[in-house]
Image (tube, grey):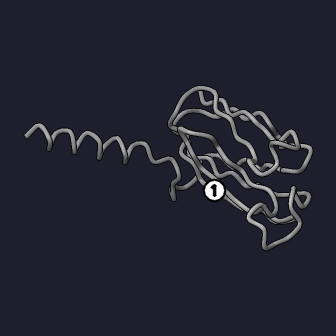
Amino acid sequence: MRWIKLFLFFSILFVVGCTKTEEKPDIVIDIKVSKNGYEPNIINVERNKVVLFRITATDEGIEKDKDSKYYGHCFYILPPYDVMVENIEKGQTKEVKVKMIYPGHHIFTCPYCSLYFPTKGDIYVK
């Protein structure tokens, strides 16, 4: 019986912890990413809102070769969200919907470029 309770607890925790969603967005945030960083790089949202992030690359990023794993830019919200949009080509817009369930300060970045360019931003969930 104890194992069943533990299993149910962790199953519920997993379902509640999923932040990428197909729900209708409450807010749309357009973000431009380049070697100069993100614009905007500070985002404030309310907790439990579904945000549609639309990320547009305005330059080619660190790698110009389309066959490279590091081609273009990306948008990565660090854990606990752990949401990644990869390989955004110059002029391309990619989207991701995220339910903002974790309050506090969270960081988003482009792991491809972050060692070379100031590609970091902050999300504050109230």
- Relative to residue 73, is residue 108 depicted above or below? above
- Relative to residue 73, is residue 92 depicted above or below? below
Name the residue: 86% across, 39% down: 118
Three-letter amino acid code at disc 1?
A: Val
Left/right placement of residue 79 relative to residue 66 reads: left
Q: Quadrant of the C terminus?
A: top right
Q: Quadrant of the N terminus?
A: top left
Left/right placement of residue 18 relative to residue 49 reads: left
Left/right placement of residue 105 relative to residue 71 reads: left
Name the residue: 20% across, 39% down: 6
- List x then y, in percent, for residue 12: 30, 44
- List x then y, in percent, for residue 99: 53, 45
- Relative to residue 79, is residue 54 depicted above or below? below
- List x then y, in percent, for residue 8: 22, 44
Q: Residues within 10 Å of mark 1 (few under 14, many from 20)?
A: some
Count the marks.
1
Q: Which residue is mark 1?
A: 96
- Relative to residue 85, is residue 89 depicted above or below? below
Name the residue: 80% across, 56% down: 73
Which residue occupies the foreground of this view, 117 or 16? 117
Q: Secondary structure at mark 1?
A: strand
- List x then y, in percent, for residue 15: 37, 48
Residue furthest to the bottom: 67
Left/right placement of residue 80 relative to residue 53 reads: left
